[in-house]
Amino acid sequence: MTSSEKIKKSRTHQSLLDSVGVDELARALSFLGWKEVMRSRACRKFKQAAALAFRGEGGVICEIKTHRDYQSLHMLARTFPELSTLHIQGSWILSDMLHFPDGDDPVALQDPEVTGGTTPLDFNVLSAFSNLQHLWLCEITANGRYPRLLSMLTGLKSLLLMHTNNLKLELSEIRRNCPLLEELMIHHDPDNLCVTGEIGILSEMQNLESLVICGCPRVTGDAMQLAGSSLVYLSLLQTGVTLNFNFDSIGRGDFSELTSLRVPGCLTVTNAEEAISAVATVCRLEKRGIQLEGRSISLSQDSADRYPTYRHYCTPPDDIEVVRADEYLRYVTDLALLEETIGPFKGFYNRPTEEEYQLAVENAIAKNIAEHEKKMKEKRHQSSK
């Protein structure tokens, strides 16, 4: 290729680049990783496009996975202060563990985590990202309270904390520091004691649409305290939260925006007659895609309709389990489990009275004794041959 041909080809490439606007170039860069976008800044147009690519809802997701990546945040903050999405994903490789110094009131660990000899990192660097809207912290090594962490990030719209098991957090801190939050997910190992607070305190967060808390038994309260909120998705498994539904309030439209509900326990009713409306309520909820975990309906512990356990053979019929027929395999599994646990109450279409309950238990005991004697007789007969 001659010199003139090279110049002509270079001019053609330049004209093609000139024909692409900064906005279009930014959209193309948004499909790349943050390191590739950093390396693309070869000219003024690419620098402008790269700055736009890190901004807004569809911006580049900055994934920090190693100790070295985190140290580069200082430079990233100077270059792209409007970065909106930051995922800090720890690693189990000792040399790459994302280790932060202990905060206030650290947990006394019997087996302190090995940090691989890395220099502790600093949460304060996050304060440089004034436009940060989405923050994920996953499997990092942090211990105690870090009161400045959320106070630096008042513009957050989504916050995900996953397996940050020793990072202490009070729900009131989230309400106070993150008023714009739309999505909150806290997912820890079971029996995590570092996340605490009354669930009702989050009802004051008007923008919150998705709330997931799992593995935090010190998060307590009644899920009905959130009934007037605009929540679309609610999951509170393995927490200390209860669900005491008020059926009249559901009819008036509480949880009107909810499309998915996962809470521990079951619906509680105060008397046996209310169970009929409870079944109808469960059906209405499931038509909206809302399914309850565990036993669906149960008499409250202080209900006057509860019977004392008779002869310690089986507990009274105080619970209703709804068998769902939306999926055949699930239906068969639920039905088989129901057949195993229904015991002496098979054949009843209404809740038995206390007398019927006692008689059913007596009949079940007599049946078991007769079956046992029959087996023993057959065994003796076979041994005598």
Image (tube, rainbow, N blue to C red):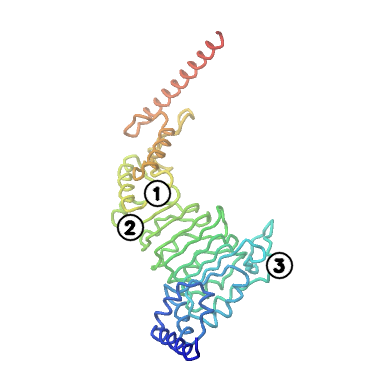
Query: At which x and y percent is residue 51?
Result: 47, 81
Residue 161 or residue 244, whichever sits in front: 161
In this view, the residue farthest toward the left is 252
Three-letter residue code for mark 2: Asp
Q: Please name the residue shown 60% across and 63% down the image.
A: 91
In this view, the residue farthest toward the bottom is 4
Query: At which x and y percent is residue 34?
Result: 52, 74
Q: In this view, does 251 lie to the left or right of 41?
A: left
Foreground: disc 3 or disc 2: 3
Per the rendering, the mark at residue 254 is 2
Quadrant assignment for the C terminus? top right
Q: What element carries label 2?
A: loop
Query: In the displayed structure, would residue 318 be above or below residue 169?
Result: above
In this view, the residue farthest toward the front is 2
Per the rendering, the mark at residue 117 is 3
Foreground: disc 1 or disc 3: 3
* Inter-mark Cα distance, 3 to 2: 52 Å
**First in sequence: mark 1 vs mark 3:** 3
Three-letter residue code for mark 3: Gly
* Inter-mark Cα distance, 1 to 2: 16 Å
Query: At which x and y percent is residue 285?
Result: 33, 51
* Inter-mark Cα distance, 1 to 3: 46 Å
Mark 1 sits on what residue?
Answer: 292
Foreground: disc 1 or disc 2: 1
Three-letter residue code for mark 1: Leu
Give residue 121's quadrant in the image. bottom right
